[in-house]
Amino acid sequence: MAVVVDTGVLLAAADSDDADHSRCAALLRSHRGELRVPAPVIPETSWQIESNLGPRSEATFLRLITVGDLQVIDLILLDWLRCIDLIETYADLGIGLVDASVIAIAERLDIGTLATLNRRDFTVVRPTHREAFELIPE
């Protein structure tokens, strides 16, 4: 089962002091090879890991891509257009490019499960390909 992954889960998995570390790390381990990460998530996560945990942790995170644990999905023109639509439609939530890209990629790849800690935004947004997203971890 493919899963689209948001920044918060990756950050929590990288930081052993994070309150959500255990469940996020377990989620990533249990879904190896099934994790789809929109390209905009990578620089946001990488920057935050480097800033908070240092360059070695950043390199460890990036290595997940090179060994195939995370599959980076580049945005295509239709994704960019959908991101713009989402940013405008949900302006009151402040959905930015990264969250919008998670939604756009899930829609394009017909994936209904998001790995996210951001329940506020992803429970409000109505995807085009189903009634709602399944959000993990619970």
Image (tube, rainbow, N blue to C red):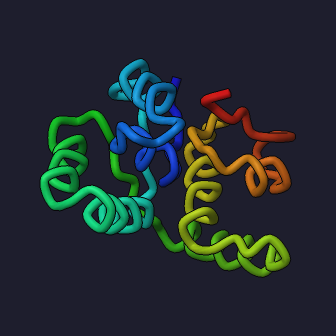
Q: Which residue is drawn at 63% across and 34% down?
A: 113
Name the image quarter holding residue 98.
bottom right
Q: Residue at x 59, y 51 (%)?
A: 108
**Is 111 located above or below residue 28 in the figure?**
below
Image location of residue 121, percent across then percent down: 76, 57
Q: Which residue lies furthest to the front in this view?
A: 17
Q: Nearer the viewer, residue 56 or 29?
A: 56
How many discs appear?
A: 0
Q: Determine whether, in the image, residue 88 is placed left or right of residue 1.
A: right
Q: Residue at x 40, y 54 (%)?
A: 73
Q: Nearer the viewer, residue 4 or 57?
A: 57
Q: Determine whether, in the image, residue 19 is placed left or right of residue 133.
A: left
Name the image quarter holding residue 66.
top left
Q: Determine whether, in the image, residue 53 is placed left or right of residue 117.
A: left
Q: Residue at x 27, y 56 (%)?
A: 53
Q: Residue furthest top?
A: 30
Image location of residue 123, percent across then percent down: 81, 47
**Is 59 located above or below residue 115 in the figure?**
below
Image location of residue 52, percent across then percent down: 33, 61
Q: Nearer the viewer, residue 98 or 60?
A: 60
Q: Determine whether, in the image, residue 47 is placed left or right of residue 56.
A: right
Q: Which of 93 and 1 is in front in this view?
A: 93
Question: Which quadrant does the C terminus fall into?
Answer: top right
